[in-house]
């Protein structure tokens, strides 16, 4: 290693290995332990391929070594194709030999039984002790297409498989399904730089692998298939870095449904994280989450050409009016703007169309296009000129015989602009699609799928960026410590409503004015002080949900009402105290804090009342969060119209709500070790502010 | 025609023509007017092909006729390839010659300009006068694959196109896009019986064509691509007939979004019907509505094998655990039940799996399958035996080299059961997919798409059937007539609240007790009669929305309150009367009646309050409707949990609500000519009944 340059991190030596030792390499190219060498010979691996086999001098025609010690020079990567019970020793030996990274193919670890789990714990210990990086166990390995490094036993490239090198790196927790997707991507013309299967993730998780890949120059798009997430923060760190480098992260995560989560838990050693947390959090960091395989491949195709859009306006040129209508429908459904062109531009387009065409947008070029392919060239020139066309889609179908000229026109237009331009070519033999993809031009069969991919591209291009939270200056840290100490000193984990409210008030969250009271007279005094109407509530450290036991009396205006309510409540729970609180009104929000096992502290915000109960209308955000991100979170609620003002009601003060959520997120972040959960229910929002009316915190 | 048999309807002669005259047939097989003859020669049309050309003795090698009059024998179908301005005369001549049906290919009718619209009106007149059936104008024609009848000028079959005959008939309003979908279907291995493009629908609409197709023995699945619906009732009649014959109707209708509807309106002469009406109504009749092209093709594939499921339980056998998880997720999202198998069946399955497989469901067969394909055979035998497996999905990928044995096992299982069995084969060369489709076994690439298709199959298989409404016996028709006459006599179209309530009460809809009153003392007397609390409302035939002008006072209990409220209101509108109504409570529904231009009278029901305002949570049903269908409509609301009881509240009386909606639907049906619209807002629903509290009707 040259002293003037920083050492290459282990993961980068693994991702571009100049030498690969295969431990347990078989001479039989068909056996699992022989496949990696066969693949690398077949595709022409550029580095040193080093079979290790104690009983053979040659393996598949290559000189073999009895052991690692017999190899001269550096080894960048070891592929361990030994049975599970020999793996721990082998990894230790690799580390001792200075091998920076190893792949463990064998199954029989945590996914199988307790004995396997013990072996996997030992592997993790070796990693911790030695610093070696480990892919697997129970993984298919990896491949890097640039240098044809293929330490893998997959059969995905059997037969007359054509490798397509490209800028998309794909990491999959699932082995077999990962290779199915890899194969489908390659057949769809999507060029790949790397594929890695992380298996049981004893060391390298999807997040860590992506963290290595994102730094590689040739990688421009990251794609992940996830079944469960252990290290959410790692994933968010990659997402933040990918955002900086403008490298999109495309992710499918299964386990969205209860059934899927159950299946994921039984299938791997993963515990599927709570899906709503994953969904909310990764989207905040600009990750493009996709629902299934086709969507993932479609996004992979459209992002692979590296273009971004500067707006949501889509211009569609279609051979078929009908296809144009379907495209307009779908595009609108994916948040794109498919408004008609300005009259002067329609006029210009009309000059190249037949009389029964339509220049509005979608532009109906009509089937005349087939006999007059030059029309497409002229129409595309106008569309590329048109400043309002942020993205362009060309819709064609069948017409194999006219493909030459049509594709020529499309290629010319594609090269003449840096804006996204995609083709939908439905029906026909499929050869025009292949041809367009060879040219690097995204091409779909279904207008709806093209619209979804364009929508994802627009969402990514126009993403706000990860949260950029600024710590509030006015946190009363002494008050926070006092509240926590008081509870700890008394061995309590449940804070009462008054303590909970003081806790969030210390973080600057506005709370409804309230005083505790010991008896009815104290309640009356408090009510006079606060001004009526007031609510009187039981203040108990044992009763969590006051309203379930009838422990809340609302809208009390006279002394007599307050006194009677207080007496009633104390009758209900003679040892309790009371909280007298000024009544507030407004739209109900619910804001909560919880600790997620994968992502750490998160905030949850939703509309209160019927919407949260009936529709589970809430969203999750990371903690800490900036007010702008908190506001976007509120505006992504399905019932957001309630906040923006419906039926002539004034809009609610969203900035106040966002500020309160951001402050609560700092609380969640700062007290991640102390606070198990906290709920503000409701946070009332009117046109001039937000007020926390009820709050309950539970310490860890 | 044999006197002993009924005459074959014109449309059936068209769908299986024994002779086709082509008017304006060109000798040039490449010209639009030469293509039909070229196609039928190429594919071997079995009937008499009769070119009509006044200047040539032969057309493309066939003897030509100067005019229709020169042809002997019956002509089942005329294809008119003449310019627009010659079409009307030609159709008239066809009718005079006794030709039962004609296709008009030319554009230049209502889709172009006013002159064209006039020509189209003339065509409609000829149809009305003569009874000839007409496809088009501005259509690509049709083809019937069984007899290779191809009166069409499409280029969809150019090149080395392979026709796949089958049981699916496809009707498209869009010409070019229809043929794109046809081509994509054929390439996906979906066999077609007919394709028809209806174009401007001067006579034959999609509904009418489907009405002919549904009666053909060889047609088992109907597929439609719609841009707008003119004759909704025709479509519902077909849907009802298709339900009786158990022939699924698969439909894509564009124009769902505002942008799509705008594009559809500019593209054809159609006015896109209101999408929510279409959606609600056709689903009630069992139509399978699909969102886009891929979904349509996927449904076409799964329905083409003719199988139905008896339940929603899906068993998945997967080579890859990861694919199984994705399938479980997607299947749950499409309403399928993917619960684990019973322990004893898991035990049985475990015996054929390797130790690291999973027998739960999704069954993880593991990648061992590739080296032991016989495992699939054994696993499938168990799955077919398992009584809880209503549907079976086999998930494979890549593995071209093992395809022989795997497909053999699948085919054996497929033939051994009549339950739906589908394959998802991801990645690889695609040849195994083609092979499976050749065998008639539905095969997908994406587990998510397979799950969607299986969900559609389950929805269809378990459909409740079209509404079967029974007229209520207790309608007070005299009261209805009296209310209508009273309004008509005074030239009013707006009924006041009291009249409107009496109208629905005459149909047996329970209304809150109410009396009109002229003055405050009358109001007090009415309140005493009804029992308090009461509401007092302005009863005006000019003020529509009372609450907007402050014309409603609620929750009045004492004489003084009633009197004061009455005085207030009369001060507001001195000429008005008052309505005193007993207060009711309950969950708010909104039920409306309106007249749809395409489907006639419909009912709309939704949850009141915030859900209808913010989420537009309502559904449309046909009128009349039976209570069971009305109940399903309520249970399809997103906020249905409100009706079923949330947070310990008792469930609402859904049967009472359904009965009220059914009665209102009869009112809508019976008064279709008289009633423009009617709104019951709210219909209050508690655990013991439904009560209409406010109602306003507008006459036509």
Image (cartoon, coloured by chain):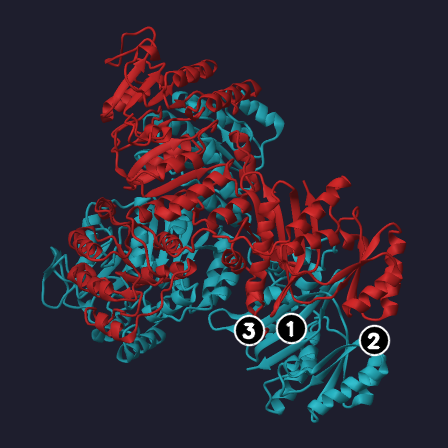
Chain colours: A red, B cyan
Q: Position of residue A172 (x, y in %)?
A: 41, 35
Which class describes the residues within 10 Å of circle 2: few (<14), some (14-19), or many (20+)? some
Which residue is labeled 1 in the image?
A: B680
C-alpha separation, residue under disc 1 versus residue under disc 3: 12 Å
Instruction: Tell me if residue B304 can be seen.
Output: no
Q: What is the chain identity of the residue bearing mark 3? A: B
Q: Position of residue B230 (x, y in %)?
A: 42, 69
* Mark 3 touches mark 2? (CB < 8 Å): no
Q: Secondary structure at mark 1?
A: strand
C-alpha separation, residue under disc 2 versus residue under disc 1: 23 Å
Counting residues from the start of the chain, the first of labels 3 and 2 encountered is 2
Q: Position of residue B102 (x, y in %)?
A: 28, 66
In-front residue for pair B93/B551: B551
Residue B630: quarter of image:
bottom right
Is A223 on the left-hand or right-hand side of A420? right
Q: What is the chain identity of the residue bearing mark 2? A: B
* Mark 2 touches mark 1? (CB < 8 Å): no
For marks 3 and 2, give the one nearer the viewer. Answer: 2
Q: Secondary structure at mark 3?
A: strand
* Residue drawn at (43%, 50%) of the image: A286
Residue B69: quarter of image:
bottom left
* Mark 1 touches mark 3? (CB < 8 Å): no
C-alpha separation, residue under disc 3 versus residue under disc 2: 34 Å
Q: What is the chain identity of the residue bearing mark 1? A: B
Which residue is labeled 3 in the image?
A: B594
In-front residue for pair A233/A85: A233
Residue B652: quarter of image:
bottom right
Is B103 on the left-hand or right-hand side of B59? right
């Amino acid at each position: 290693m040259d002293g003037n340059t920083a050492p290459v991190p282990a993961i980068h030596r693994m991702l571009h290995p100049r030498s690969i030792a295969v431990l347990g390499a078989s001479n039989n190219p068909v056996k699992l332990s022989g496949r990696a060498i066969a693949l690398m010979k077949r595709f022409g691996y550029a580095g040193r391929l080093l079979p290790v086999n104690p009983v053979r001098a040659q393996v598949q025609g290559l000189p073999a070594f009895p052991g690692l010690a017999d190899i001269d020079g550096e080894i960048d990567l070891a592929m361990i194709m030994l049975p599970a019970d020999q793996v721990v020793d082998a990894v230790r030996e690799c580390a001792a030999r200075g091998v920076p990274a190893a792949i463990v193919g064998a199954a029989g670890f945590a996914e199988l039984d307790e004995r396997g789990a013990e072996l996997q714990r030992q592997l993790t210990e070796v990693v911790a002790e030695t610093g070696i990086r480990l892919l697997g166990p129970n993984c298919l390995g990896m491949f890097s297409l640039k240098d044809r490094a293929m330490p893998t036993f997959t059969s995905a490239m059997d037969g007359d498989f054509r490798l397509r090198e490209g800028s998309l790196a794909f990491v999959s927790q699932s082995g077999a399904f990962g290779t199915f997707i890899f194969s489908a991507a390659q057949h769809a013309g999507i060029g790949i730089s790397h594929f890695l299967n992380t298996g049981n993730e004893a060391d390298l998780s999807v997040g860590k692998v992506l963290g290595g890949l994102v730094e590689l120059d040739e990688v421009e798009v990251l794609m992940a298939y996830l079944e469960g997430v252990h290290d959410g923060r790692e994933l968010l760190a990659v997402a933040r870095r990918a955002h900086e480098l403008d490298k999109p992260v495309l992710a499918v995560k299964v386990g969205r449904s209860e059934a899927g989560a159950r299946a994921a838990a039984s299938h791997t050693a993963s515990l599927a994280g709570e899906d709503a947390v994953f969904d909310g959090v990764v989207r905040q960091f600009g990750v493009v989450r996709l629902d299934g395989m086709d969507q993932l491949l479609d996004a992979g195709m459209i992002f692979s050409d590296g273009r971004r859009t500067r707006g949501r306006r889509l211009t569609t040129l279609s051979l078929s009016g009908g296809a144009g209508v379907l495209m307009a429908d779908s595009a609108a459904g994916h948040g794109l703007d498919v408004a008609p062109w300005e009259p002067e531009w329609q006029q210009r387009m009309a000059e190249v169309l037949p009389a029964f065409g339509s220049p509005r947008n979608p532009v109906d070029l009509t089937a005349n296009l087939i006999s007059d392919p030059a029309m497409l060239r002229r129409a595309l020139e106008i569309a590329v000129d048109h400043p309002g066309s942020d993205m362009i889609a060309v819709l064609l179908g069948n017409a194999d015989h006219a493909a030459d000229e049509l594709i020529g026109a499309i290629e010319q237009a594609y090269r003449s602009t840096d804006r996204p331009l995609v083709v939908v070519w439905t029906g026909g033999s499929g050869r025009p699609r292949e041809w367009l993809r060879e040219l690097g031009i995204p091409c779909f069969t279904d207008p709806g799928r093209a619209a979804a991919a364009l929508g994802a591209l627009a969402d990514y291009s126009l993403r706000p960026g990860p949260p950029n939270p600024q710590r509030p200056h006015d946190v009363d840290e002494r008050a926070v410590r006092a509240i926590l100490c008081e509870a700890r000193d008394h061995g309590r984990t449940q804070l009462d409503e008054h303590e909970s409210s003081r806790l969030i008030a210390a973080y600057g969250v506005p709370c409804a004015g309230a005083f505790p009271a010991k008896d009815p007279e104290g309640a009356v005094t408090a009510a006079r002080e606060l001004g009526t109407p007031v609510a009187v509530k039981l203040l108990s450290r044992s009763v969590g949900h006051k309203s379930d036991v009838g422990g809340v009396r609302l809208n009390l205006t006279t002394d007599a009402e307050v006194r009677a309510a207080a007496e009633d409540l104390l009758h209900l729970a003679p040892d309790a105290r009371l909280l007298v609180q000024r009544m507030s009104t407004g739209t109900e929000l619910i804001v909560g804090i919880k600790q997620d096992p994968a992502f750490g502290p998160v905030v949850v915000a939703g509309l209160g009342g019927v919407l949260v109960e009936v529709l589970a209308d809430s969203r999750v955000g990371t903690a800490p969060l900036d007010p702008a991100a908190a506001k976007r979170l509120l505006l992504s609620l399905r019932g957001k119209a309630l906040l923006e003002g419906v039926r002539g009601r004034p809009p609610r003060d969203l900035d106040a709500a966002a500020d309160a959520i951001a402050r609560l997120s700092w609380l969640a972040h700062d007290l991640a070790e102390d606070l198990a959960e906290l709920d503000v229910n409701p946070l009332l929002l009117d046109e001039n502010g937000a007020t926390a009316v009820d709050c309950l915190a539970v310490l860890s």
